[in-house]
Image (tube, helix red, strand yellow):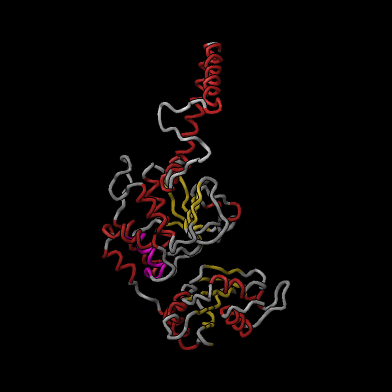
Amino acid sequence: MSYRDASRPSFVGVDADLSVDGGLEADVLVVDAVVDSLRALDPLVLSLLVLLVAGVVLGGWWAVRWFRRPPGSHLQRVLEEYDDVAVLMHPNPDPDAMACAMGVEAIADSVDTETTLQFSGEIRHQENRAFRTVLGLDLESIESSSELAADTVVLVDHNTPRGFTGAQNVEPVAVIDHHPGNGTGTRFTDVRTEYGAASTIFVEYLEELGAATGEDDGTALELTPELATGLLYGIQSDTNHLTNGCSKAEFDAAAYLFDEIDEDLLERIANPQVSDDVLQVKATAITEKRVEGPFAVCDVGTISNVDAIPQAADELMHLEGVTAVVVYGENDGTIHLSGRSRDDRVHMGETLRHAVSDIPMANAGGHARMGGGQVSVDHMQGLGPSDGIGREEFEERLFSAMAGERS
């Protein structure tokens, strides 16, 4: 749609009255006065004035160009300013987090910046272990901020450092994530909560930078089969194979990666052997579940592998008639919760957050379709400023929260 100011006269020919209300004549007089003033200036002053104007125009042009630069290019320029960076994944990293770390590594390598991929916690889930082994990832575990490989830290797949001593004092230079939260980077922040996986963001970066076709002005940024396979599996794992929590961006990313993936690597990651303890927890969830209407809850007891809990929750979601589930179990004095939902009425992240809201030292959250949390057993039993609750009452809370009941 074009815009036209109806209050201004329309000049349709050279014979039109060009001095409407004397406006044109006044404009000419003003221009003449400005020209005379410039002629009267000392040549040196005039030269300095011209240089100043040129500097302002050029600076403005560079500022606009910087802020309008695609985010992938912006991240690449930020990484280029450092000799080495620590790429930090969230505790107990999953394929999405590890694939994002691979993405940072590839972009950093293209500008000769050294990277060290680090995480806190453990990699226990058989799928996560297979991802690391099959793709040959060199990852370092840390327990303290003093073990970070560089002062410059890039966070991927989470936006607030956590899970190690001194995490609260770490100020990341860059944050790339798809989870809700207020964490930011000092130089670069890209958090897209509408995306199903953080890997999708890195696929867009690589496409912007011409990784697949080498169009990025000769920079050595290569989309290897390992990187393409990792990113695709990162997307699949966080969206239940493109069936849960997807945006259009996930499908576009998968299409972009398709020609470069290694099907053998993908199959080996997707079909790892399952340990006996995981099968035992799944069996307990299936046989000991408690079902009320469309919701199911199960306490799987004391467990040695906390990664079995989300797998058990996934298993219960196959139960006909069940639309939301929560599975929880105890490990080393902490109750770990995992929830799944395909019910539009149940935002699982909010459900779990509400269920533990008045238990000291508890935390929970997540997305609409999946969530998780941790509760200290001692605080649940009454340690701290609360009366404590038992397991049966806790389960009632979970059912009430899934039903949308808020006290």
Q: Does residue 233 show up magenta in the picture?
A: yes
Q: Could you tell me residue 406's position as x and y percent?
A: 64, 77
Q: Residue at x 44, y 59 (%)?
A: 198
Query: Quick check: 291 above or below 32?
Result: below
Query: Quick check: 259 above or below 329?
Result: above
Query: Quick check: 57 above or below 253?
Result: above
- What is the chief secondary structure element of the magenta stretch? helix
**Quadrant position of residue 376:** bottom right
Q: Residue at x 50, y 56 (%)?
A: 191
Label total for image: 0
Q: Quadrant of the C terminus?
A: bottom right
**Quadrant position of residue 398:** bottom right
**Quadrant position of residue 248:** bottom left
Between 330 and 403, the one lying in front of the other is 403
Between 289 and 277, the one lying in front of the other is 289
In the image, taking residue 329 as reference, residue 356 lies left or right, namely right
Between 30 and 68, the one lying in front of the other is 30
In the image, taking residue 204 as reference, residue 347 lies left or right, namely right
Q: Which residues are magenta?
A: 229-242
Residue 200 in view here: yes
Q: Could you tell me residue 326's position as x and y percent?
A: 52, 78
